[in-house]
Image (cartoon, rainbow, N blue to C red):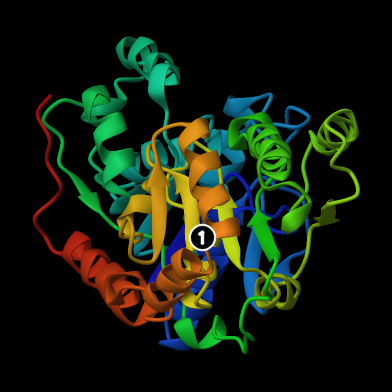
Amino acid sequence: MRIALVTDWFHPRVGGIEKHVLSLALRLRARGHDARVITPWPGPDTVSGIPVERIHVRLVPGLGVSLNPWRLARRLRRVLEAGEFDVIHGHLSFGSTASMVSVYLGSKASIPVLTTLHSVFRRLGWVYVLAQPILRWRQWPFRATAVSDVVAEDVRWLAPGRPIELLQNAIDPAEWTIQRGPPESGRLRLVAASRLQRRKRVDALLRIFARLREEVGPTVEVTLEIIGDGPDRSKLERLCNSLSVGDSVRFLGNGTAEDVRALLSRGDVFANACVLESFGLAALEALSCGIPVVARSEGGVGSFIAHGENGVLLASDSEMLSALVELATSPEALARLRTGASAGIPAANTWDTLLDRHLEIYRELMEPTPVSYTP
């Protein structure tokens, strides 16, 4: 099969979509399929041996959205025609111009199209509602999937009646198994992995951390290490200083998978305060390493975290603070979650399961019966 994986953001940019698309491409090619990434994001023509077609257009600084979608469409059409693809798989977040255009072009060229929604849209979804009378995108023949039930429920109102299937993110547990020692008495090491931007609420995590230090006092040493980068890094570093926690918080910047594993190897708890987390790939990696997760309950982390067993899911920042205080002051509570986390991740979130499901959907799309939808 010749498969076009279309994404607006890709390496060298680092994030959940970028990691997922690269992992999917690597595994598809390992199975003998010709998977190629198509993206307007600038970078090299190959990444980890994966061919990457870069669509050269001007992008909005900081967003990666094309300034000229018509030029993007012309150039993307030429790439799709030259590639003679059997299936187009568009990976969508809010503002995914290239992925949306690929869905349109695929429908015009009678190429089967699968879309996977990677983001929670909330009120931003009205942009797509307002675009419907012009683009008539609801009539395009494509199969829709989402990385979590949270995302599926969030976007279902945008296209009433269209089925949205679950097609979660995945990892290989063998790549996320580490050696960890027992927790140190009188110490709690928090770790996080996130793009440093407003949507991820790293500022909220820092405020929770500052309160945590106040609550536990000098009896427990608490630290926080964050791997990842983004436009808000300087602002977050200034916030640390204003909260007087700069001596206990480390910003590590972007890192490789090995850097992430090294961070997880010295962590006791993975923390995530984002309320718009569509899935939580970094949290899944932490769980695979046996680290319990403390996160907000609104996001997709609940797809693989069982509250009170391998982590805790909280409805507010104040509840998140209380949970962390308990874990910092009660070795028994932390031990219970570590035991639950040691069981690893659900089989549904492994590539052994998810790659087969991707291929099954691709083959179904290539069957003579087209995808139909009546709004």
Which residue carries the number 1 mark? 283
Determine the residue positioned at 53% across, 78% down: 289
Does 308 appear above or below 28?
Answer: above
Q: The C terminus lies in which quarter of the figure? A: top left
Determine if residue 19 is in view. yes
Horizontal arrangement in the rendering, residue 320 relative to residue 182 (left or right): left
Horizontal and vertical percent position of residue 206: 71, 38
Horizontal and vertical percent position of residue 143: 24, 47
Between 105 and 165, the one lying in front of the other is: 165
Does 101 appear above or below 25?
Answer: above
Between 124 and 114, the one lying in front of the other is: 124
Determine the residue positioned at 79% across, 33% down: 232
Q: Quadrant of residue 196?
A: top right
Determine the residue positioned at 15% across, 47% down: 371
Determine if residue 225 is in view. no
Rate crowding at label 1 as few (under 14), some (14 to 19) or many (20 or more) other CA atoms within 10 Å: many
Q: The N terminus lies in which quarter of the figure? A: bottom left
Horizontal and vertical percent position of residue 332: 46, 69
Between 26 and 232, the one lying in front of the other is: 232
Horizontal and vertical percent position of residue 344: 40, 78
Circle 1 sits in a helix, a strand or a loop, which is it?
helix
